Image: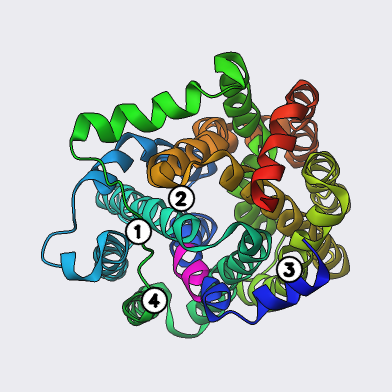
Amino acid sequence: MTLRDTLAALRRPRVWLMVLMGFASGLPLLLSGSTLSAWLTDAKFDLATIGFLTWARTAYTWKVLWSPLLDRYPPPLLGGLGRRRGWIVWMQLGVTALLAAMAVVGPSLPLIAVLVLALAVTAASQDIVVDAWRTDLLTQDERPLGVAIFTMGYRIGLLVAGMLALVLSDAVGWSTTYLIMAACMAACVVVTLMAPEPDVSGRPTTLGAAVVEPLREFFGRGHGLRAALAVLLFLTLFRVGDVLAATMNMPFLKALGFTNTEIGVLGKVITFFGSVLGGLIGGGFVLYLGLFRSLVIFGIAQAATNVAYVALALTGKSMPVLVGGMIVDQVAGGLASTAIGVLIMGLCAQRFSAVQFALLTSASGLLGHLVAGFSGVWAASLGWATFFGLTMAAVVPALLLLWPLRPLVEAAEREQRG
């Protein structure tokens, strides 16, 4: 892609629409993750219980199982909006209702676990359709920038669900905070109604076709079955350490004595700019370095940033270490997310985008979310420094697996550049 192509893509409104749709995808994640962990910590839940509750969020890793339903069947009552937008509206309304229900119920077991599971299923279903929508809508020359800008919107959603929610919790309490988050999600419906519906033909005519044909196409390509399985394993291993660290991030910082407001304002607001910077420059770096080298470099950088948490565990509460570590962490995370996003888009055939994108993104979080349930037990038994040190080493198997996959990665990159 030339500089002229890049500037031309930036002038297209649908590229910048990725910010708003990214926000809608990012908002629910922390509200069933680290922000919920802060609420549970304030409610005096123990680390093991907080860790085990993360299993309710494994819906994000199993979404491929019901993605064919969203690809095969039109949305009830909202079919006039189109196959993609109609389902997105339904899921956004569902997320809104579930956040409001969590505000009313509060952190009481077992009902909160049921609501978190339902929230994860609904938010993951939104991701299925939003990922298919942007894959269908963006042209090949728009995708690197589109992924970067979507990542920026996603990070804004995380900022609102993280920083704003934490600050609000100190001011108005957790229940009111979750009601405000529900209102933010409701506003996303307006964005979806304004968004264009991609013109994609070839919707599966049977449920069997919706399940079989995307898998047959993916596993039957020229790169072969072994390479297809290897790339799924790579995606599974790539973010294990990052997911484990994120699961215990909030209990760890609160154990050191950081308040919700300190974490929200001084931590997340400042580091927000790091995440946006990482996401925005990620597309440019992928174009300059190439996708393969970007995955290697950004993967190492993303893992190495957990050294800040090791330092905090050894030295105690330090706002400069927290802020500096989070800035670097978010820049590296934004870079890695962009590279992975470009890889996944390049591996998807457009007419099977919903199921194949769900398959690949499910793989990218599968192992991390499964083992995250034990993160509280491990942190309590190993100690914080050892725990975060192990999360840094977790990326090594993925990087070793990446080397023999170089031809497949380069083929996916050529798909992006047309």
| Residue 320 image offset from top left, x and y in percent | 87, 69
Question: Residue 418 — which label?
Answer: none
| Residue 356 image offset from top left, x and y in percent | 45, 38
**Residue named by callout 4:** 195
- Marks 1/2: CA–CA distance: 9 Å
First along the sequence among labels 1 and 2:
2
Question: Residue 107 — which label?
Answer: 1
Report crowding for label 1: few under 14, some 14 to 19, many 20 or more residues within 10 A (C-alpha): some
Q: Residue at x 74, y 60 (%)?
A: 283
Give 339 or 351, whichever is nearer the viewer.
351
SS assignment at label 4: loop
- Marks 3/4: CA–CA distance: 22 Å
Q: Is residue 363 left or right of residue 289?
A: left
**Residue named by callout 2:** 45
Task: Confirm or deny contact between disc 4 and disc 1 (CB under 8 A).
Answer: no
Report crowding for label 3: few under 14, some 14 to 19, many 20 or more residues within 10 A (C-alpha): many
- Marks 4/2: CA–CA distance: 41 Å
First along the sequence among labels 4 and 1:
1
